[in-house]
Image (cartoon, grey):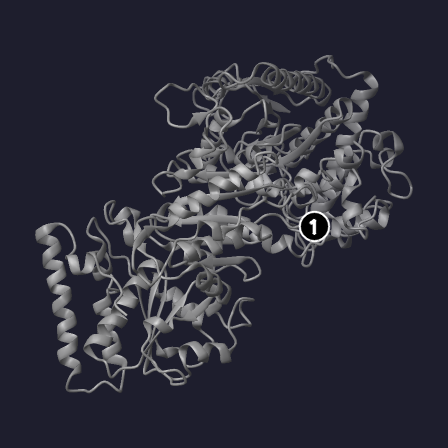
């Protein structure tokens, strides 16, 4: 057995590997008594036995008879390499919880270690309480083994069905962000976050070390990062695994941590060293928090972090087929990959499992023996049973003000222009004030609160920062509840951890840059899609994402800031969870946001720009419109009651709405014989057929709005293809002629942006003329030419004057 000696960081000439030294048997001295040491070692052996059993066995769980090929699963799936390290940490945290009556949750960054965490929540009894058929006996152990990574069973990652988890381990990089999110406003909670050395190479994780600059020890819980270095990813060495202790210490101390190293491969010595380190870290955390409570916060605390170096695949086979396995990349997944067909490997598996002495760990019924069961915390102190890891159990309703009180007066459509998100800022301000006692609401944004016109929140709240502050800072304090950090990953990750541990919040971002964290949004959506199928997982507050500074009005920033792609991402998710709202004005935004903040188990995407825009609906009309999801706007149409239109002008999104209503007015003036109906969509999911989304329309409702056979010219905020995807399945959808963002952009004027993408009022009007059979053929070319001339005039004007013509810039609806 070899271990990396970080004090020797040179490379042996000609070998290309860091120099290594043989481990030696060291005296097992430390805080654990002999009895405690033996107990924790045997408990860890039980964890490892169950882990190996899940990966390999479908029968004979306690090996009451010699292993035979039919006892082995036909398809071997799972990851052994990280699992013993994860179980090692879990077992030691159990001791800490028992001795200090601590509230701890466990987040496993190396999500491939799913069988290890499953083994632990099974041993502590939580798993059998949640899933009674996986009982704590031989039959239950057999089910535990058979369900792992098999059809109809459980995933190989630490995932939604795993009690105690708030963190899907399949996509790496988010464990620290989720951990800190869970710790914010949870003063009694300790979040143990195991960071894998492969995960430590990801950008989101590297950024997450900075989270301690936002952790307030006087009101928040604590995060204990445990950087687990076993040296390898799936095939390659890891950067930090090959780094010296000094290099790692410099890295983490530079981020503000007090670094503790534990390393080795001799279990007794490593147990003692880790126990002593864990005790020291816990005392350091409590001292920091006591100081914060007694003296307030004067700057960033130096929180502890542990660096644990143990071999990959620890306690597994040393070598297979003449090649080293333990401590190498070969231990990452299956140390023995041909057990069912290779008698030699079958014998090696038998020997491996026998090395844990299961007959000394489990009784004849298959239950953990009492002296080892005594190592398990009780009740909700078990990490798998913690209510903080099933956030709906501790969730309090958000106390929201009446959103009607923030309404804009709208005497007639488009009579004035206002910044819609500024009204939302006032609502959020008072939401903070009403929930100050509960401390269960936060706003997360990448340095864009004021830019997105949400700055009213600073009338009652500050930006959170526990680092040094100076007089020139604007609303920055140690106890602020608004997070502004220039990392979309951190904003979303913190909020996800905050929600899954039982609180509420909103993530606001420039539209284009929400794509940076789009994969996190996808993973959270997948989490909720599975969670709603588990009765024991209580509903949590929805993930609410506000996208402002949208593609259509990022004309000053240019092409890099112009991208509505998150809509496409969310459209691919299940209708049980995904929601997309495109409010056209302030009152609609207020109504939609109130609904979203009250909702549970959804991912709500709200898209609206921050710039001054026409206000179309009074509050009562906006409420009715939001409830319906889509409505015909009679005031913008010219269809007599009881008659069908010749054409439908549809729209979804604030700028598409403006251009659509302006197109309807132009057609009324230049082609008054055409009967045009304007339909506005605020809940994008209502356009789905009913069978594809719970908000979707049946064919009767669809025909009421869009007719059964008339052409539809639709202006859409996002990519055209997305709209076509949504309406697929309705009657005769070839009638839809969609204009939207087609990846054309630059630094230009607002009107030139819609021109570049073919979605201007004149493009829409010309499309109507082309598609409407009732229009006189002799007039159509002339009117289309007029539209093209208007486009050319506006383009030339913007090039000459650097702004749009006044008749476009100052356009208002004329009844």
| Place of residue 525 in the rendered image (x, y in percent of width and height, measured from the top left) | 54, 52
Q: Nearer the viewer, residue 714 or 179?
A: 714
| Place of residue 717 in the rendered image (x, y in percent of width and height, measured from the top left) | 35, 60
Would residue 594 be found to the left or right of residue 162 on screen?
A: left
The image quadrant of residue 254 is: top left
Q: Nearer the viewer, residue 660 or 693?
A: 660
In the picture shown, does residue 454 fall above or below 815? above
The residue shown at (39%, 70%) is 724
Check the picture and name the quadrant holding the N terminus.
top right
In the picture shown, does residue 437 fall above or below 725? above
Would residue 275 be found to the left or right of residue 305 on screen?
A: right
For label 1, the SS is loop
Q: Nearer the viewer, residue 463 or 576?
A: 463
Q: Nearer the viewer, residue 425 or 446?
A: 425
Would residue 318 be visible to someone looking at this image?
no
| Place of residue 692 in the rendered image (x, y in percent of width and height, measured from the top left) | 53, 69
In the picture shown, does residue 516 fall above or below 21? below
- Crowd tier of the residue under label 1, counting other residues whose Cα lies within 10 Å: few below 14, some 14–19, many 20 or above: many
Would residue 572 be found to the left or right of residue 170 on screen?
A: left
Check the picture and name the quadrant holding the C terminus.
bottom left
* Residue under pointer 1: 148
The residue shown at (69%, 46%) is 55
């Amino acid at each position: 057995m070899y271990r990396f000696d970080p004090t020797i960081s040179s490379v042996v000439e000609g070998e290309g590997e860091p120099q290594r030294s043989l481990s030696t048997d060291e005296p097992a001295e430390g805080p654990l008594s002999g009895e405690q040491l033996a107990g924790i070692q045997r408990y860890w052996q039980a964890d490892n036995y169950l882990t190996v059993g899940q990966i390999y066995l479908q029968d004979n769980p306690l090996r009451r008879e010699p292993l035979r090929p039919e006892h082995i699963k036909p398809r071997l799936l799972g990851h052994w390499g990280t699992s013993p390290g994860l179980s090692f940490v879990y077992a030691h945290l159990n001791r800490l919880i028992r001795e200090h009556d601590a509230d701890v949750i466990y987040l496993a960054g190396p999500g491939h270690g799913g069988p290890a965490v499953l083994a632990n929540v099974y041993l502590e009894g939580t798993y059998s309480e949640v899933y009674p058929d996986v009982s704590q006996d031989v039959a239950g152990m057999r089910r535990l083994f058979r369900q792992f990574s098999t059809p109809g069973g459980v995933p190989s990652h630490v995932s939604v069905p795993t009690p105690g988890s708030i963190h899907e381990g399949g996509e790496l990089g988010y464990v620290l962000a989720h951990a800190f999110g869970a710790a914010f406003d949870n003063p009694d909670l300790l979040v143990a976050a195991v960071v894998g050395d492969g995960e430590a190479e990801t950008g989101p994780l590297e950024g997450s070390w900075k989270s301690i600059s936002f952790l307030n020890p006087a009101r928040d819980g604590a995060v204990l990062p445990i950087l687990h270095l076993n040296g390898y990813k799936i095939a390659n060495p890891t950067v930090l695994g090959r780094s010296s202790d000094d290099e790692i210490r410099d890295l983490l101390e530079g981020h503000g941590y007090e670094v503790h190293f534990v390393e080795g491969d001799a279990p007794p010595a490593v147990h003692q060293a880790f126990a002593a380190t864990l005790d020291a870290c816990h005392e350091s955390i409590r001292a920091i928090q006591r100081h914060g409570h007694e003296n307030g916060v004067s700057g960033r605390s130096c929180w502890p972090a542990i660096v644990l170096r143990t071999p990959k695949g620890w306690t597994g086979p040393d070598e297979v087929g003449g090649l080293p396995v333990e401590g190498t990349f070969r231990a990452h997944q299956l140390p023995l990959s041909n057990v069912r067909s290779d008698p030699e490997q079958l014998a090696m598996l038998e020997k491996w499992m026998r090395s844990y002495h299961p007959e000394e760990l489990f009784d004849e019924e298959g239950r953990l023996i009492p002296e080892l069961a005594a190592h398990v915390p009780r009740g909700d102190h078990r990490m798998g049973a913690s209510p903080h890891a099933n956030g709906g159990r501790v969730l309090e309703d958000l106390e929201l003000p009446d959103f009607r009180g923030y309404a804009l007066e709208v005497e007639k459509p488009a009579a004035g222009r206002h910044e819609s998100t500024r009204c939302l800022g006032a609502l959020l301000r008072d939401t903070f004030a009403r929930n100050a006692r509960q401390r269960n609401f936060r706003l997360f944004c990448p340095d864009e609160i004021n830019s997105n016109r949400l700055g009213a929140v600073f009338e009652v709240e500050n930006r959170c920062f526990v680092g040094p502050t100076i007089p020139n800072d604007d609303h920055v304090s140690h106890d602020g509840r608004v997070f502004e950090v220039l990392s979309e990953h951190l904003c979303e990750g913190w909020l996800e951890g905050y929600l899954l541990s039982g609180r509420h919040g909103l993530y606001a971002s420039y539209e284009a840059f929400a794509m940076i964290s789009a994969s996190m949004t996808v993973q959270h959506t997948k989490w909720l899609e599975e969670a709603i199928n588990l009765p024991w997982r209580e509903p949590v507050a929805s993930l609410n994402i506000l996208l402002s500074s949208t593609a259509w009005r990022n004309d000053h920033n240019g092409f890099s800031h112009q991208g509505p792609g998150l809509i496409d991402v969310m459209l691919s998710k299940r209708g049980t969870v995904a929601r997309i709202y495109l409010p056209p004005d302030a009152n609609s935004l207020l109504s939609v946001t109130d609904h979203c903040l009250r909702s549970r188990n959804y991912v709500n995407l709200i898209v609206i720009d921050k710039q001054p825009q026409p206000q179309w609906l009074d509050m009562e009309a906006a409420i009715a419109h939001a409830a319906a999801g889509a409505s015909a706007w009679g005031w913008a149409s010219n269809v007599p009651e009881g008659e069908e239109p010749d054409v439908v002008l549809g729209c979804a999104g604030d700028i598409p709405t403006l251009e659509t209503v302006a197109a309807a007015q132009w057609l009324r003036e230049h082609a008054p014989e055409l009967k045009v109906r304007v339909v506005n969509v605020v809940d994008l999911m209502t356009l789905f057929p009913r069978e594809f989304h719970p908000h979707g329309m049946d064919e009767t409702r669809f025909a009421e709005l869009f007719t059964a056979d008339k052409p539809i010219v639709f202006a859409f905020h996002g990519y055209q293809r997305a709209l076509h995807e949504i309406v697929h399945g309705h009657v005769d959808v070839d009638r839809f002629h969609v204009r939207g963002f087609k990846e054309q952009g630059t630094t230009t004027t607002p009107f030139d942006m819609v021109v570049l993408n073919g979605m201007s009022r004149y493009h829409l009007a010309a499309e109507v003329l082309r598609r409407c059979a009732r229009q006189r053929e002799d007039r159509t070319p002339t009117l289309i030419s007029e539209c093209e001339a208007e486009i050319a005039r506006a383009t030339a004007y913007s090039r000459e004057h650097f702004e749009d013509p006044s008749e476009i810039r100052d356009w208002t609806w004329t009844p």
